[in-house]
Structure formats: structure tokens, C-alpha cells
Amino acid sequence: MAAILQEEAIQATNDDATSCKLAAVSLGYWEDPYVSYFIRSPTRKPPEINRGYYARVKGVESLINKFIKKVGNNCQIINLGAGFDTLFWRLQDTGHSVANFIELDFPAVTSKKCICIQKNKNLFNRLKAGDAAAGCTGADLHGTGYHLLGVDLQSVDRLLEKLDQCGVQDGLPTLLLAECVLVYMRGEEVHRLLSCLARRFRAALFVSYEQVNMNDRFGDMMLTNLRARSCHLPSVAACRDLDSQRQRFLQAGWDGAKAWDMVEVYHSLTSSERRRIERLEFLDEQELLMQLLQHYCIAVAWKSDLFADVSIAD
Ligand SMILES: C[S@@+](CC[C@H](N)C(=O)[O-])C[C@H]1O[C@@H](n2cnc3c(N)ncnc32)[C@H](O)[C@@H]1O
């Protein structure tokens, strides 16, 4: 019973993330014409949350763009714990139709995403409209070059089977994404997952966004708030600092790893971008924004030296 409640609480974090993204998009922080298909109306969020989301979306986007610039469109993107993320459609809008795009989450989440995609022509028709293969079976949806798969990421064997079914190739450059996902899994399961992915791909870049510096009072407060919503973070030990974030990948056999806290990511945005978003809403609590940014990070890890020079700065 407790395990079911915990799983439901983890899945509900996707509703929070989608709601925060829609709130920020509605205020003009960034453009995403697709997020509103997954959640009805925006709920207002405090300005520091909107700015934090902006830094996260832009930081991750800049690493994805660098990856594609390096390897071209003949690559695959695997989004672990994708929730209702709209990256597949946003990337197409920028002219990037990658060879294979795979999204994974619990079946309870992917089945809801399947329904939203099927209901909205602007989403569904982009999965290569008219293709007989584009169809939804329960929690999975297969298009040409797009696959949405329902699976518990802690069942690594099942995950590998699913990846095989949708034509994932070991030799193709691969971007793996996990935004606020690994922390909800047990440490040994994360190790198994990261080790198996490190063995599987020859040229890969892993981009992870997650909590960091959790061993202070602000971190305690974040944990208490999450616990109050029945949401526990079994892998919080890896969120101690930037080094523990990197070590998790190195111990799992990745060739190298780097990590930046979100203060650094925020300051890597161009000054004109920062000025634009800072004009969108008045922010009284600068200190609160900085505390929030200090407690999240982007970590990257790579297989193949091709990605060893990856950097958050331009
Ligand atoms: C905070 S949400 C983030 C969603 C999305 N990555 C984003 O950035 O908007 C975390 C997501 O990870 C998924 N998740 C966590 N643990 C998982 C697991 N063991 N297997 C599959 N999905 C998982 C949750 O269901 C949820 O959709």
C-alpha cells in the first residue's frame, strides 16, 4: 500500500512540472505551443519558480542543441521519465527531426500522454501522419521515429527489451535525458540503470537535471515539503554536492562527467535573455531565487571523447 502511494506521488510530480511549465510559458518566459494540450489552465506560480524553470529549460535545451550540432540529426534521443514533456514537437519546429525519439515513463503516465497525443491533431499528425504504424496500444505509442513506452525504469531488463522493440541502435550517437527522475529511484537501481546504459551505447551523452547541495537547512526544508506529499527521494545521497552527482556516473562506467549548479547555468544565459525575463515579473525575493538555483544542478556524463568538451557556457 505504501509503495503504491509512493509511486502515485512520484507520478504526480509530472503534473506539477507540467503545471509550472504552462504557468511560465503563459507569461512569455519561453515558447511552447504544445504544453497546453497536456494540462488545461495555468495556475500562477511565484516568479522565482518561473525563473528557475526558465533556467532549467534553457540549460537543458542548450546541451541538446550542442549534441545535435556535433552529431547531426542521425541520432537518437531517449527521455527517461519524460512525463508530459514536449521536446519531440519543439525540436521538430526548429528543423530537427532526429532518427529515433523515445520517451519512457510509468505506464500510468504514458497512457495519459497517449490519449492527449491521439486527441490532438497538432501532436498526432507530427508522428508521421498517415503512417499505419502510428498507433497506441495501452500505455505504448509507436510512430515512425517516435516511441512512447510505459515501463518502470527500475526494471532494467524490461527497459532494454522495450528499447530493442523500437529499433534503438547501440552504434548511433545517443542523448539520454533525465529531468528530476533518478532521485525518485533507489540508489542501487540507479546504479544498475546507469551501468547498463553505459555498456549499451558507444557514443552517448547523458543530461540529468536534479537537486544538489541537499545537506543544508534549505535542502531539509525541500525534503520535508516533499515528504508531506508522500514523496520520498531514495537517491538523495547522490544529491549531496556536484561531486556526488558526477561520481554516480563515473562509478557506473561512464567515461567522464561534469556538473554545474543552476546559479552557474542562470549566469550562462546571455545578458539580453536575462534582462528580458527579469522584466516579465517583479521579483522581490532575489535571495530566494539564488537559494533555489543553488539547490538544483545539471550533470552530464559521456561515453566517447566526442562529448568530453561539452560545456554549459557557449
Ligand atoms: C518531476 S517529473 C519530470 C517529468 C519530465 N522529465 C519533466 O522534466 O517535465 C518525474 C517523472 O519521472 C517519472 N519517473 C520517476 N521514477 C520512475 C520510474 N521508476 N520509472 C518510470 N518513470 C519514473 C515520473 O512518473 C514523472 O513523470
Image (cartoon, helix red, strand yellow):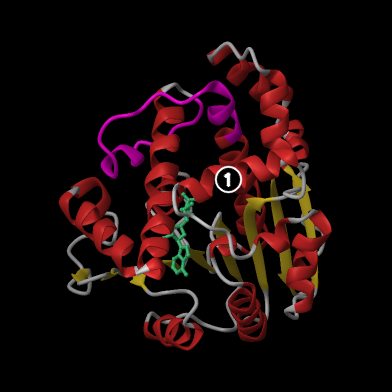
Q: Position of residue 38 (x, y in %)?
A: 29, 45
Which contiguous range is marked in magenta?
A: 29-52
The residue at the point 57 percent across, 84 percent down is 170
Magenta span dominant secondary structure: loop
Q: Quadrant of the N terminus?
A: bottom left
Answer whether residue 146 is visible to the viewer in this image. no
Task: Identify residue type, mark 1.
Answer: Thr
Q: Residues within 10 Å of mark 1 (few under 14, many from 20)?
A: some
**154 relative position to 192: left or right:** left
Magenta-span inclusion, residue 50: yes
Q: Does the beta carbon of the residue at mark 1 sit less than 8 Å from ligand 1?
A: no
Q: Position of residue 235 (x, y in %)?
A: 63, 64
Q: Quadrant of the C terminus?
A: top right
Answer whether residue 23 is visible to the viewer in this image. yes
The residue at the point 42 percent across, 74 percent down is 152
Task: Give above or below for 306 relative to 273.
Answer: below
